[in-house]
Image (cartoon, rainbow, N blue to C red):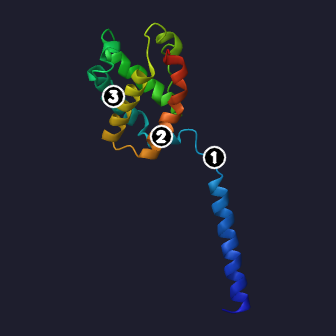
Amino acid sequence: MTLQGHAHATAISAISALLIGMNAGAQPRPDELFQALGGREGIARLSADVVPRLFADPRIKHFFKDANAKNLVEQLSDQLCAASGGPCTYEGGAMKAVHADMAIKAGDFNAVVEDLQAAMDAAQIPFATQNRLLALLAPMHRDIVKR
């Protein structure tokens, strides 16, 4: 390679590295997770799958015995949509108030997470996307779980 060719290749490498570095530090779009979950339709399908799992799970179904499944699907869908950066507004109650008298333990919370993960697996949501959603929902633990 000639000196001029080497300089040209070095310049291209430097520009490529700069562009890659700029993209690596780029902030994700606010609705990127929302889109990764399939938008409103994908989140609605996910919610419609997870709620029956919660109602059927012998570890936690007693918490849902008086719940309206259709309303829960709608509320969960709105909550996941809003949390993931979608154009939805969650108008349900605050997690702390809604769960105040339920005596939910860590194992109960974990069962809900496992059912959500099973629904996400069934929807073929990639593991990294699942983790991003779960990371957004994790802070609810302190408002829901009573030790």
Give the Cα separation between the discs numbered 3 and 1.
30 Å
Q: Nearer the viewer, mark 3 or mark 1?
A: 3
Q: Is residue 118 visible?
A: yes
Residue 126: % across, % down = 41, 46
Give the Cα separation between the discs numbered 1 and 2.
18 Å
Q: Nearer the viewer, mark 1 or mark 2?
A: 2
Helix, strand or loop at label 1? It is loop
In this rendering, is residue 42 above or below 98? Answer: below
Q: Earlier in the sequence, mark 3 or mark 1?
A: 1
Q: Quadrant of residue 127?
A: top left
Nearest to the observer: residue 108 or residue 40: 108
Residue 122: % across, % down = 30, 39
- Residue designated by label 3: 50
CB under 8 Å between discs 1 and 2 = no
- Residue designated by label 1: 27
Q: Is residue 146 left or right of residue 18?
A: left
**The residue under label 3 is which amino acid type?**
Val
Q: Residues within 10 Å of mark 1 (few under 14, many from 20)?
A: few
Q: Residue at x 34, y 12 (%)?
A: 67
Q: Earlier in the sequence, mark 1 or mark 2?
A: 1
- Residue designated by label 2: 131
Q: Residue at x 36, y 22 (%)?
A: 73
Residue 69: % across, % down = 31, 17
Helix, strand or loop at label 3? It is helix
Helix, strand or loop at label 2? It is helix
**The residue under label 1 is which amino acid type?**
Gln
Q: Residues within 10 Å of mark 3 (few under 14, many from 20)?
A: many
Q: Earlier in the sequence, mark 2 or mark 3?
A: 3
Q: Residue at x 35, y 13 (%)?
A: 63
In this rendering, is residue 47 above or below 66? Answer: below
